[in-house]
Amino acid sequence: MKKLTALAGALAIAFLNMMPASACTNVLVTKNASVDGSTMISYAADSHVLYGELYFWPATTYAEGTMLKVYEWDTSKYLGEIDQVAQTYSVIGNMNEHQLSIAETTFGGRKELGNPDGLIDYGSLIYITLQRAKTAREAISTMADLVEKYGYYSSGESFSIADADEVWVMEMIGKGKGVKGANWVAVKIPDGYVSAHANQARITTFPLNDPENCLYSKDVIDFAREKGYFDGKKKDFSFADAFAPLDFGAVRFCDARVWSAFNIMNPAEMGDYVEYAQGNSTERMPLYIKPSRKISHRDVMNIMRDHYEGTPLDMTKDAGAGPYGKPYRFRPLTWKVDDETYFNERAIATQQTGFSFVAQMRNWLPAHIGGILWFGVDDAASSVYMPMYAGMTNVPYCLAEGNGDLLNFSWDASFWVFTFVSNQAYGRYNFMIEDIKKVQTELEDNLTSYTVAIDQSAKALYDQNPDLARQFLTDFSMNQAEIVTERWRQLGQFLLVKYNDGNLHEEENGVFLRNEHGYPKSPSFPGYSEEFYRSVVKDAGDKLKMRELPTK
């Protein structure tokens, strides 16, 4: 087992300083790895400045010569104009009406390969492609063509690209200032397997003559040779090692999240990679694994809520969790004590998530019905995934763009309602998260059951009138989003009363108890755990110890 060198440890600090603001996680599931035969990809759009809202583009016809203005997704910076196509497809969030879904994580990679003259950033690449492509393979071709023609503006990215039949990972990085095109490779995940990526390039060696399962830019290996990133035989070329070499931070903050997702889906196999996840080895995990059981959309939702619970990296167990087992560490990611640098774990679920989703694609239904974007806002651990059908023709007001923003609160906006709840939970986590999970499970159980019936009704309607079926799906998704948001608003008020001022008010089925005179029943005061009290005693010494007053 290869140990990380001292140099790699030192490089970790540099890595931490250049980590992108967005630090996201994707999980990918193929048809025969899923419970029902659906394909799935998930995404957590993690950023300190991203507002959680559901994007929407209607299908549109454009006149010849129409130009499309491109703005960088992360900053809204205007990048330029590109040719618009004659016909675009409707897009709900990160899924289009053909069940094509695309997600990403930023790995950064070699800084000298950035191209500030490019017109297509990674976010625009996703959303423009969703409006132009029907399948995963067509999306890969479209993305490659766009950056070849207009230049790639962003740093290194890993993309999850899936339709109702195939699931792919595509990794891309630019060629440097003023050079159009990009270095990229795309690998199809074998049916029956799962994959994941989290801000670190994961494609190493790949088949050079298997276009059914692997596609790549024609000069990717020659380019790496010219730059001095690689000098071996073609068959030994590793995209990740050439363009995003490992360091301690890449393993501990990025690939450790992949390990945790894999560990949930196949714990026996991942036991061999605990040392890697802890940053004590460079023995890479495989790009994909076979899960030990079939994976459901609910399983993927729960993976997106992971904080390494039950593993050596469990964030609820060390002193940083505080007295209430909080699995969050507010930034900065690294900090110093006595000239030594320390770090906080970076889990899949994090407080700075703008939105997250589980995209579910089902090939046995018409595309407008088969695609469900299970969409949630704010921290995935304390959010609810709401079903948004691929055939929708509008979005719920509570999730719509322009309903509040990151600097303007709105009680009508799902993002702010969910943020209201999650920020309460951070203060008394191990108590409040149980109340949150109860309502979360109740709602998601109901929504999962509803979609079974909605699928059947929509299919019957679709066979007679596709447009009416789409309206039916739109009404359902819009209504459920508003119902969930209202229920969460009530939950936030309930939590505020139950835990007001550090008290714990007794309740039964959501009704707070009163004494025989109708006055509020006296609350309890559960205090801290014995372990935390011991840490207080150790720190305070005898200062807080009860004792007799001295005699005169």
Image (cartoon, rainbow, N blue to C red):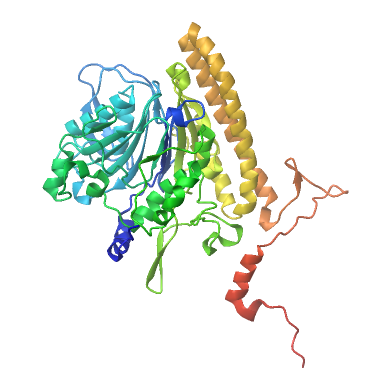
**What residue is drawn where x is 48% and y is 19%?**
369
> Does the image show residue 348?
no
The number of discs equals: 0
Quarter holding the C terminus? bottom right
Q: Nearer the viewer, residue 426 or 401?
A: 426
The percent position of residue 330, horizontal first and vertical second, equals 47, 57
Q: Is 392 or 442 nearer to us in this picture?
A: 442
Determine whether, in the image, residue 213 is placed left or right of residue 483. Answer: left
Write the residue at 55% across / 30% down. Answer: 481
Q: Measuring 62% from the left and 29% from the top, which residue is drawn there? A: 446
Foreground of the two, 207 or 65: 207
Q: What is the x, y in percent for residue 360?
A: 46, 28
> Where is residue 215, by image quadrant?
top left
Residue 164 x %, y %: 41, 24
Q: Is residue 473 above or below residue 201?
A: above
Position in image of residue 59 (x %, y %): 36, 19
Which residue, as the protein is rendered here, is positioned at the far right? 516
Position of the N terminus by quadrant: bottom left
Q: Is residue 354 above or below residue 459?
A: below
Residue 339: image quadrant is bottom left
Q: Is residue 220 visible?
A: yes
- Which residue is at the front of the view, 528 or 496? 528
| Residue at image location 62% in from the left, 74% down from the top | 537
Furthest residue to the left? 226
Outermost residue to the bottom: 552
Left or right relative to 350: residue 156: left
Residue 203 drawn above or below residue 484? below
